[in-house]
Image (tube, rainbow, N blue to C red):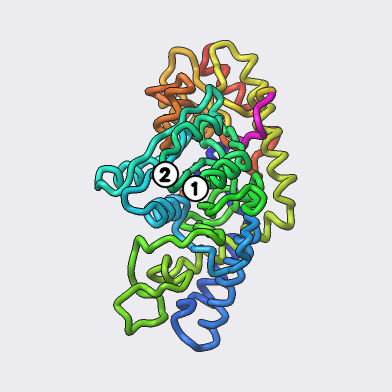
Amino acid sequence: MIYCDNAATSFPKPPAVAEAMAGHLRAEAVNPGRSGYDLALQAAARIDALRARLGDLFGNPARDPNRTILASGATAALNLAIAGLCPDGGHVVTEATAHNSVLRPLEALRRAGRLEYDVAPCDGLGRVDPDDLARLIRPATRLMVLNHASNVTGAVQDLAAVGRLCREHDLLLVVDAAQTAGVIPIDMAAALVDAVAFTGHKGLLGPTGTGGLVLGPRVEPRPVRWGGTGVRSASLEQPAALPYRLEAGTLNATGCAGLAAGLDWLEQRGAAALAAAERELAAAFRAGCADIPGVRTIGAAGVANAPVAAAVISVTVDGQDPAKVGALLDVEWDIAVRTGLHCAPLVHAYLGTAPAGTVRFSFGPFNTPEQIPRLLEALRAIAGA
Ligand SMILES: Cc1ncc(COP(=O)(O)O)c(C=O)c1O
């Protein structure tokens, strides 16, 4: 199989990820932080080291490991950020490339009468103009939620410009880094980002069920889940201290062991070099698509003047349903892609790809240049070119 669905989750994982998880289960799978015996303390120390590492990865100026909240992924982190940071009656600004992990919590909270929100448009490449975000700011606006890179077009937003805008209006900026964590650097201090929601199972090469929210020094979310923390058990109130305030329940420590191994692997290989290689593959694929009649590439990657893009290329084939193209790629060519709306329902109106969506090819560190001709051959055959 040629796996081109890395934007959904990276695969394969570096072998060290599986080894670390198996080793954890064999030797250290006790509940970190709940008990005082040596192994539990050792497990807790490893989790704390991971928190510190993730905070540093995103340049958190708070430099406090307890401000890395571990969660099951970007979805859990974004739910926490939105419900935990927007006060009742507040207003949120987001934009058209937003994933359902942003749009659905916003809509649910709007229907519950808790907040209002507006969505800024994007251009035909999936880029958002900060002036369009600015136009939506109201006196009640408290929060802006920006998708760092579109999982449909790969377009990367100008974080620094949006960060400045948010500071000018005294808004909190939450960034969805699901597509960029480990691939396109984020410096929270330089870009004035208040919180980064990340996933551990895509660019960071960890297992599914990992991710979290890195909290800068200005943000103090209220809890959105309540439960055991292993500290202050006599109290019926959630402890105020971080990370306990936001981390009820037993952590996915085995997943965290895998995530740490993914980070090690990225560090050893050089995240920047890997990301550059992935973008080169995406650019070669895109260039090849341009020569196939009936195949249209959507969005930013490789387009002149586009900001640096994640290695995601969406295509459509004239007259063919993306779902059918995806099925043919799978069944006849053993090529794994994702088709449809990609959980980002609003962006397609701006890309001209509503309602059926696109066929998305997304590249990771285990894709190779040798695979590109085969992908193009398959598309050529399916397009009847
Ligand atoms: C842009 C974007 N945001 C959020 C998510 C959700 O991430 P997770 O699977 O970690 O919950 C995804 C992944 O599907 C995504 O592409």
**Is 211 rendered above or below residue 357?**
below
> Measured along the vertical axis of the image, is residue 258 above or below residue 306?
below
Q: Secondary structure at mark 2?
A: strand
CB under 8 Å between discs 2 and 1:
yes
Residue sitting farthest toward the front: 139
265 or 59: nearer the viewer: 59
Give the percent coordinates (x, y) of residue 160: 63, 42
* Depicted 384 relative to depicted 3: above or below: above
Residue occupying the point 42% across, 31% down? 341
Asked whether 308 falls inside the magenta stretch, the response is yes
For the residue carrying disc 2, how many other residues have a C-alpha within 10 Å: few (<14), some (14-19), or many (20+)?
many
Q: Nearest the camera: 73 or 304? A: 304
Q: Which residues are magenta?
A: 305-311
What residue is at 56 percent from the left and 38 percent from the top? 149
Residue for badge 1: 171
Indicate the quadrant where residue 72 lies.
bottom left
What residue is drawn where x is 54% and y is 69%?
A: 66
> Whole-percent x and y of residue 8?
49, 42
The residue nearer to you, when weighing 380 against 342, is 342
Q: Which residue: 36% across, 54% down?
A: 87
In screen coordinates, is 31 left or right of 148?
A: left
- Amino acid type of disc 2? Thr
Label whose residue precedes the other's in the sequence (2 or 1): 2
- Characterize the magenta stretch by its predominant secondary structure: loop
Residue 35 horizontal/vertical position (percent): 46, 85
Residue 378 relative to residue 355: left or right: right
The picture quadrant where one finds residue 349 is top left
Q: Is residue 10 visible?
A: no
- The quadrant where residue 282 appears: top right
Residue extending farthest to the bottom is: 37
Disc 2 designates what residue?
A: 141
Task: Give me the C-alpha separation between circle 2 and circle 1.
Answer: 7 Å
